Image (tube, grey):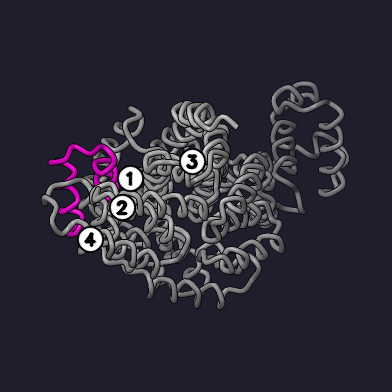
Amino acid sequence: MDSEATLADAREAYARKAWATAYRQLREVGAHHLDAADLHRLGTAAYLVGDRDTAVLAWERAFQLNHDAGRALPAARDAHWIAYVCAVSGNHAVSAGWVARAQRLLEDQPEDVAERGYIAIHGVMRHIFAGEFAPALEALDTVSVIAQRSRDRDLMAFTLSTRGRLLFHLARVPEGLPLLDEAMALVTAGEVNPMLTGEVVCSMIEGCQEVEDFQRIAEWTRALTRWCEEQPELVPFTGACAVHRAQILRWRGSYPEALAELALAHQRYAADGLPPATGLALYERGEVRRVQGDWDAAEVDYDGAVSYGHPAQPGQALLWLARGRTAAAVAALRRVLDEAADPVARAQVLPAAVEVFLAGPDSGAAAAAADELAAIATAFRCTAVSARSAYASGLVHLAQGEAPEALALLRRAWRSWIDLGARYEAAWCRVRIALAYRALGDEDSAVSELGVARRTFTELGAAPAAAEVGRLLGRALPDGLTAREVEVLQLVASGQSNPQIAAALFLSQKTVQRHLSNIFAKTGVTSRTAAAAYAFEHDLA
């Protein structure tokens, strides 16, 4: 074996981000024949193909070589990466040990070396994992100062993205979003370590999901997808990328495509050994199946998410509500709200809580939840959060018999969801708008809105929602007429022929004739003239 030639090939593969090739060739040379720099390459390549054990072993050997040669800064950098991988893998005690070793190595080093910033990152993350966001922000100041003085691009990207997300949790979203934009500019310029690039972009997309900034989510998911596609041998981050694509598809109502992406994410997470992330994929699949009406499968997914360490709420509570388990849904969301301390976590639960509490029925708790969500929406200034707030407040006003106030809020929410391309949410706004019309005595407008909503739900494959709208239409229409049959009846009453009705409703003449037969049977009329008279008598014309 020509080790020098293999090593040269490995370095070339590493430079062009062919991680699996570099990993295989570096291992072929053998760790004991690699210097510290090549061992670092092996560690990085191993991590990026999903072999964390080899990554840690490579960095441990690089650490030893650097340490024995008196190279304190490279050794501290190696210790950082070992600690990072151990923490990601759940080995927090081992991670803490390597952080302590690095800190001792840096005792005699200048205060502004980049390695001090890397080690300080671990303290920041401990605060974040403990939910201590204000202390985490203070600890991040140290990293920020070192990043600026050392001009280390990796530290800059980390501090910008992390500060932005921390500001979200302190209800300072308008301050945080520009920092994420700045971090993304660094990342897309290709100036950041590939391991950190994936972590930073995924973290920022997750942060935007928390505040439902759909525009950034879509834009940055496209960027993440391109980045992953440029590295076909990459394993980490590809699962998260698939989940992010699935979430966008779910928001747009493309449920089968979302399920396909989630299946890919599940496979990728399994290959990368990330149980919590697998829980996220299962939760997202449960959300899709709940909307589709595959409730038994959704329940399995939510339970699976919990088994992997991911919370099942608020989706599971909405599922329980749909299945008539209202008390269980109320109890679950009360518990979750009691546990959720920061505004980001509460904003994700409050919209569902309003619906569940109203079904409770506990209009007081629902009104309080809607008011709190309105305050958060004002602070966040994010379109989707504001839309959820307007919808929630509209539901409360509707339940309290205040139809005009409800109508204004629901229309505002509907316009926002239409602008965002969220057809499912927009259709639910139409349903509630219809109920407001009905409360105001405008039954024709109510039927029209319900008809549009049901068609939308049917097109999306949202069976439970379509059935609920059908129930609302059935209750309002006489003799069991459907919304489509009423549309046909209205055109008959206006004097239109079957061909004209078919053209107006985009139906075949055969379908129109079938609807007319159903109308005659249900209403007991025997002619078009009698059908028209029936329409006028029942205020359907």
Q: Which residue is mark 3?
A: 45
Residue span colored magenta = 136-162
Tell me whether circle 1 and circle 4 mark residues in contact (CB < 8 Å): no
Locate residue 344, reporting x and y percent: 34, 58
Q: Nearer the viewer, mark 3 or mark 2?
A: 3
Q: Earlier in the sequence, mark 2 or mark 1?
A: 2
Q: Which residue is mark 2?
A: 377
Residue 504 visible in the picture: yes
Q: Locate residue 381 relative to residue 201 in the image: left or right.
A: left
Extreme residue toward the front, this view: 1
* Amino acid on which disc 3 is placed: Ala
Answer few, some or many: residues within 10 Å of disc 4's Cα (few below 14, many 20 plus, some between 14 and 19): some
Q: Earlier in the sequence, mark 1 or mark 3?
A: 3
Q: Which residue is mark 4?
A: 103
Q: Earlier in the sequence, mark 1 or mark 4?
A: 4
Q: Earlier in the sequence, mark 2 or mark 4?
A: 4
* Magenta segment, prevailing SS (helix, strand or loop): helix
